[in-house]
Amino acid sequence: MSAGVIIGIVVVAVVVIVGIWAIATYNGLVKLRNLVQEAWRQVDVELHRRYDLIPNLVETVKGYASHERAVFDEVTRARAAAATPGQGPAQQAQQENVLSQALGRLFAVAEAYPQLRATENFTALQAELSGTEDRIASARRYYNANVRTLNTRVETFPPNIVARMFGFHRAEYFEANEPAVRQAPRVSFENTAGTTGVYGATPPAPGPQDSPGGAPWGGEPGGYPPGR
């Protein structure tokens, strides 16, 4: 067997090995991308479960504190913005931050009304919302784990060569801290209309206070937003 034939066989073998590796890498990236999209849909389902509970919660609190119109309007606007379809994880996280702060104010209002907190309807809604927050946290962890795996594959060598060739990109993280529903601290706020209110464990008192409380949410911008 001549040297040229041997070289030819070696070249063909290398090409076949590289081709098999490229196909396997591409299929792995597709699988990871699909897992990220699936995980994001689960987050979205749980977020919408949360949105569905909020109107009933607002109406229940309104029955005992109808004069607290500013906080009800704030929650309603924040819910509408968060429920807007087509947002990516980073943008969604910003909207959830606003909604969590508004819910913190709503529960702070409820703290001032013992009769409200003792009603079966309010306690059931609070428990269901708390359970939903747990499911959101679980779905978020699963989603972020898949995002981390995908981003690692997209950024490391040599898989990043295949990723660039076929248009795979980093995905966005969706992160959040402890949700506002778990605690109702003393909260003050000024809404978009310039109305300032104080809510806490005591009945509302007039006078502006400092910055609002609430559980911060955060997202990492950049990358593709997984489809809903």
Image: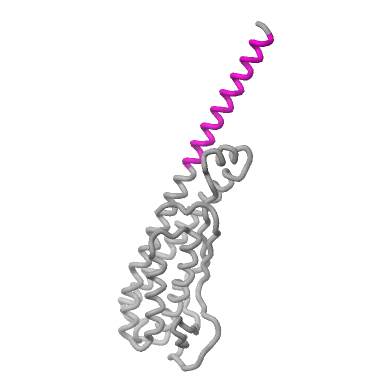
Let me know if residue 201 appears in the view: no
* Residue at the outermost right position: 3
Q: Position of residue 104 (x, y in %)?
A: 46, 77
Q: Which residue is drawn at 30% across and 76% down?
A: 121
Determine the residue positioned at 46% across, 93% down: 205
Is residue 151 visible from the viewing direction of this image?
Answer: yes
176 sits to left or right of 55:
right
Q: In the rendered structure, does residue 123 fall within the stretch colored magenta?
A: no
Residue 18 higher or lower than 155, as above or below: above
Q: In which quarter of the image is residue 130?
A: bottom left
**Residue 4 in magenta?**
yes
Residue sitting nearer the eye, 101 or 119: 101
- Nearest the viewer among 51 and 194 is 194
- The quadrant of the rendering that contains the N terminus is top right
Q: How many labels does the image show?
A: 0
Prevailing SS of the magenta stretch = helix
Q: In which quarter of the image is residue 41?
A: bottom left
Examine the rendered structure and indicate whether residue 163 appears above or below residue 93.
above
The segment highlighted magenta reads 3-31
Q: What colouring method underlies this structural image?
A: one colour
Q: How far from the left and from the top, in percent, is residue 145?
A: 52, 51
Residue found at the very far bottom of the displayed protein: 206
Q: Where is residue 9 in the image (x, y as percent from the top left)?
A: 61, 15
Which quarter of the image is occupied by the C terminus? bottom left
> Is 212 situated above or below 149?
below
Q: In this view, does 79 lie to the left or right of 9?
A: left
Residue depicted at x 38% and y 86% = 68
Residue 93 position in % (x across, y down): 49, 64
